[in-house]
Amino acid sequence: MDLRDTAPDSWEQEEEDVEAGDATGLQSALAALNVNAKPFVPNINAAVFVPTFLQSTPTETAVSDTSQAEPVARMEVSETVAPVENGGTEADMAVEDTWEHKEEPREGEPGGGALGEAGFIEEAREEEEMMEEEEEELPVLKVVPPPPDAPKKEHVNVVFIGHVDAGKSTIGGQIMYLTGMVEKRTLEKYEREAKEKNRETWYLSWALDTNQEERDKGKTVEVGRAYFETEKKHFTILDAPGHKSFVPNMIGGASQADLAVLVISARKGEFETGFEKGGQTREHAMLAKTAGVKHLIILVNKMDDPTVNWSLERYEECKEKLVPFLKKVGFNPKKDIYFMPCSGLTGANLKEPLEECTWYTGLPFIPHLDSLPSFSRIIDGPVRLPIVDKYKDMGTVILGKLESGSIFKAQQLVMMPNRHTVEVLSLLSDEVETDEAVPGENLKLRLKGIEEEEILPGFILCNAENLCHSGRTFDAQIVIIEHKSIICPGYNAVLHIHTCIEEIQITALICLVDKKTGEKSKTRPRFVKQDQVCIARLRCAGTICLETFKDFPQMGRFTLRDEGKTIAIGKVLKLVPEKD
């Protein structure tokens, strides 16, 4: 019986026994150490290396007959030699033994026998793959750099807008899948994860909602970005948030867009919620128009829903309610608006025409985008690039859409309103490195000569010969859209102009403008109220970059917001110089 299992006669006795045992064990361990071992000296006259299959037994016997008197020295030599001599030495055997200890080959697997090493490598590779799958996998968009001689495709920025839960992110994800920008394997993984959370219909939106918070709640917060190509054009998808708390982010996304896709849900009750007073369908359509979007495609989504079932009556009902409102906002129903039924979840009528929907004769969504006429761009104008975002990555990186002019590598530009001179180190257009960029492209620029902390969203990159205007005070024409009480001088709101967000105060009301005739009132109004148009003087809390609407429409239109609502839209008429 093991002594440790029996109870001692007294605890003192046990402690003495343990101490005595420890002391004798330590002494024997110290005695075993060979303190006088000879220092290791490499054998320069060692025999030449001979591969195993050419070796005869004498070499082996020579190794076994080496002096037994110096075990430590012999062991050191064999350890050092082992990696060099891969013959049948003892050291080599020891190495092989350790491998076998680590990874015992299982029966019926390629781990045993002569295939031991191959099996081990195979298993390691499998483990690596498993690890990769377990890591949070963001959709790596397949960016194929175009061949150098290929003509450059036109860049078009499409913003998806609409009420919360209309299906904007799902349609974006489906388009990316249909155009081959997201792999099937990635989507299957999302589907598995979404099923675990009882949200199996959300998996497509995860291609654009990469943030964990966005995935958990099913709500987009930041503007998602992705891209796809057709035969003629290169599209950037800007997936705007639909929730009313994130309208400022949506305005930032719409300010970069050439084309807006208003997604509405045809499901009973959902369309009505989005379109009524508090819904985002109205506000988003209006903000898109203010942001300078000329063309609007209305996707009537969820047509496959059991309450709709591709019904023409429901489609026409949505259309009849929307057209008068869009007309009021400023879209021309004949030229600027195009209606289209679809289903984001099944992908119906997005790429291929649909058989079930016999009454719709137009092109599906992606071919329709491809067939749109080209947008007019100011290529030879001054460089204007409003900054959307910035971060540090081996230098200072900024993101934004080039509004006019062209940018190339090693170009010297000026950051306004700080007047920092910067140099372009590298240019990325939708993750593909280029040497030159033209208007309409979404760019990432790496800059030299400025720190990331010195840049704010809303700053503008210009060329030194033609700087953009900056200031704090300007006169503007404003349309009051929604405000319960009257607006007087001294009223504060938040100004959204291009990518810039700034607090503002109406310092003076100059005159009222008649909506129908455009005539200006002779006297200064004391206040303005809802649905009136006026010219007012506005003053910002800080210096901002802006242009007059006449000179540069994209940087001269703005919205005013207060208490989470859009109060007014307007355009800059005149910049007022600061008094010294």
Image (spheres, helix red, strand yellow):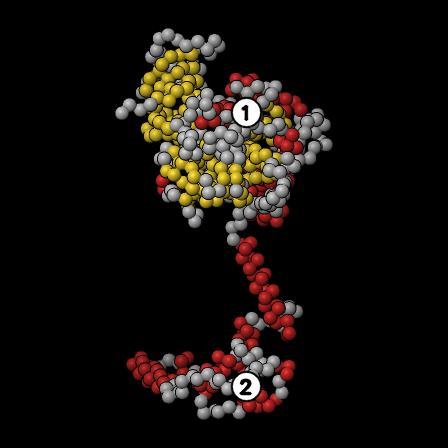
> Dividing the picture into quarters, in which one does residue 430 lie?
top right
Image point 58% across, 22% down: which residue? 336
Q: Callout 2: helix, strand or loop?
A: loop
Taking the spot 44% from the left edge, 89% from the top edge, the residue there is 70
Q: Which residue is drawn at 45% across and 92% down?
A: 69
Furthest residue toward left:
580
Q: In this view, does 258 lie to the left or right of 415?
A: right
User: Which secondary structure lies at badge 1?
Assistant: loop
Name the quarter where the C terminus is drawn.
top left
- Viewer can see residue 473: yes
At label 1, the amino acid type is Lys
Number of disc labels: 2
Residue pointed to by mark 2 = 47
Quarter of the rendering containing residue 3: bottom left
User: Does residue 216 appear in this view?
Assistant: no
Q: How far apart are marks 2 and 1 (CA)?
A: 85 Å
Given the image, on which type of amino acid does mark 2 rest? Answer: Ala
The earlier-in-sequence mark between 2 and 1 is 2
- Residue 273's place in the image compared with 399, above or below, is above
Q: Mark 1 points at which residue?
A: 294
